[in-house]
Image (cartoon, rainbow, N blue to C red):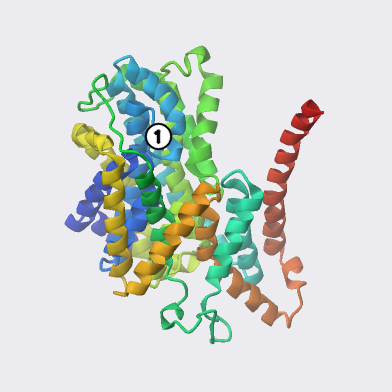
Amino acid sequence: MDGIIQSLGVIFGFSGLAVLVIGAVLGIIIGALPGLGPSIGLSLLIPFTYSMSPELSMLLMISLYTSAEYGGSISAILLSTPGTAAAAATAIDGYAMAQKGRANEAISISLTASTVGGVLGGLALLLLAMPLAKLALQFGPAGYFAVGLFGLTSVAALSGGSLVKGLLGATMGLAMATVGIDPIAGTPRFTFGYFELYEGVPFLAALIGLFAVSEAIALAEKRVRRFDMDNSKVGHVFMSWPLLNETWRSMMSGSVIGTLLGILPGVGGNIACWVARDYARARDKKPQDFGKGAVNGIAAPEAANNATVGGALVPMMSLGVPGSPTTAIMMGALIMHGLHPGPQLFTEQPTLVYSILFGVIVAALIQYLVGSLFLPLMARVVLLPTGVIAAGIMAFAVLGSFAIRNLMFDVWLALGFGVVGYVMKKLSFPVAPVVLAMVLGYLIESNYRTALVSSQGSYMIFLTDPISVLFLILSVVSIFVPIRRAFRTQRPNRAAAA
C-alpha cells in the first residue's frame, strides 16, 4: 500500500505532471513526423533522463511512447503518410475523410480512440502484471532461459516478414551481447583491447545508431519535400456524442485486440491495427464504406495501436522480456539505472512499479488533454522539410551518445551503428531482433550457463523443468508457423508458374 501511495505522489506531483505533459507534446510531434516513431524518440530521449529519478524517467518515456503511437495518425489523416507503421491502417479511411473536408472529425476520432485504447491497455497492465510476476518467481534458470529464447524467436519470426533475416538479426544482437565481462568467469572477452567495451557494447550508442542515425541518413537521402494542407485545416478537436455513439464498439474491440496482441512479443501495433480494422469491418453495418471514409475504420486501429502499449509492458514488467522494440528501449533505460525488470522489481522497487502501472493510464489521459488543446499548433510540424528533420535528429543523436559517458568512442560507435542500420534498411533486414537480442542476451546466456552448472552439465534440466519445456515448445512453434505460412504462400505461385 505504501508503494501505491508514494507512486501516486510521484505521478500527481509537480515534477510528475510536468514530465507527463512534456512527454505528450514530444510524443505527438515525433509521431506526426513521417518516418519517425516512438522507438526513435525514446532512443534520443534516454540520455537526457539519466540524471532523473527512475520513476520520473519512466513516466516521461511512457508518455512519449503513448503519444507517439497516437501522433502517427495525424500525418496519416492529413497527408496519407503514416507517421508510424502502426498508423498505416488509419491512413486509408482517415485521409478519405480529410479529402471530404472532415479532417477535424477524423482526428477527433483518432484522439478519442487512442485515449480509450491507452486507458484499457493500462488497466490490463495493472491487472495482469502482478499475478504474472508472482508466477514468474517460481521460474528457475532453465525456465528463464526458455522464456528469453521464446521472446527472441517470436520477434525474429514476426518482424520484417523474412524469418531468415530476422534470425540473422537476432544472431547479430546475441553476438554483440557477448562483448564485455563474462558473467560467469568474470574475465573480459571480445573487447579487442578497448577498455570502453569492458561493460559491453554501449546499448545506448547502438540504439541511437540503429534507430536515429540510420533514419537521419535515410531522410537526408530523400529530396526536400513540402506538403499542402489547405483542404485539411486543423482546429481544436473534441469528439461529438453522435460520433462517439457510432464508434465506441469499435474502440472497445480494438482495445481488446491491441492489448492481447501487444502481450505477445514481436506482434505490436503494426499487426494489431490491421487485425482490429478487419474485425471492425466484418461487424460493421456498412462494410462497403471502409476505404471511403468510414469512422470505424479510424476508431478500431487507433484504439488497437495505443492498447498495445500497456500490453507490451506486461511481459517486460512481469517476466523481464520486452514485448516490442520500444519496450526493449525502456528496459535498457531501466538497466542503465541499475534496475532489472522482472518479478524481483515488484518487491525491490514497489514505488517504481506502481508509477509505471498507473502512469500508463494517466499518460493516456494527459495525451487527450494536450492533443485537444494544442493540436492545431503541433500539426504544423508535418510541413517541415526532410532535410531539417534529418539535421535535427543527427544533432540530438551525437549529443545524446556523448552525454552518458562523455566519451567520443560512443559517438563514433553510434555513427558506425547508424551506417549498419541504414544498410539493414536498404536490404530489408529488421532492426527489432538486433535490439531485442542485445537486451535479452544477458538473460539467456547467464541462465543457460547457470542451469548447466547446477545440473553438472546435463542438458536434461531443460527437458525436466515444465516451464522450460512449455516455452521451448512455444519457441519452436514461433519459428515453424512463419515457415509453414511461407510454404503455403509459395505453393500456389509455383503451381501457377508451372
Q: Is residue 127 above or below residue 376?
A: below
Q: Residue at x 22, y 50 (%)?
A: 22
Residue 73 quadrant:
top left
Amino acid type shown at disc 1: Pro
Q: Residue at x 32, y 73 (%)?
A: 408
The reply to whether residue 233 is visible in this rendering is yes
Q: Which residue is nearer to you in this view: 428 or 460?
A: 428
Q: Is residue 335 above or below residue 23?
A: below
Q: Which residue is mark 1?
A: 82
Residue 138 position within the rendered picture, expressed as x and y whole percent measured from the top left = 60, 67
Q: Is residue 238 left or right of residue 196?
A: left
Q: Classify mark 1: helix, strand or loop.
A: loop
Q: Which residue is nearer to you in this view: 498 or 195?
A: 498
Residue 17 position within the rendered picture, expressed as x and y whole percent measured from the top left = 21, 51
Q: Which residue is nearer to you in this view: 37 or 295?
A: 37
Residue 477 position within the rendered picture, expressed as x and y whole percent measured from the top left = 71, 50
Residue 368 quadrant:
top left
Q: Residue at x 69, y 78 (%)?
A: 452
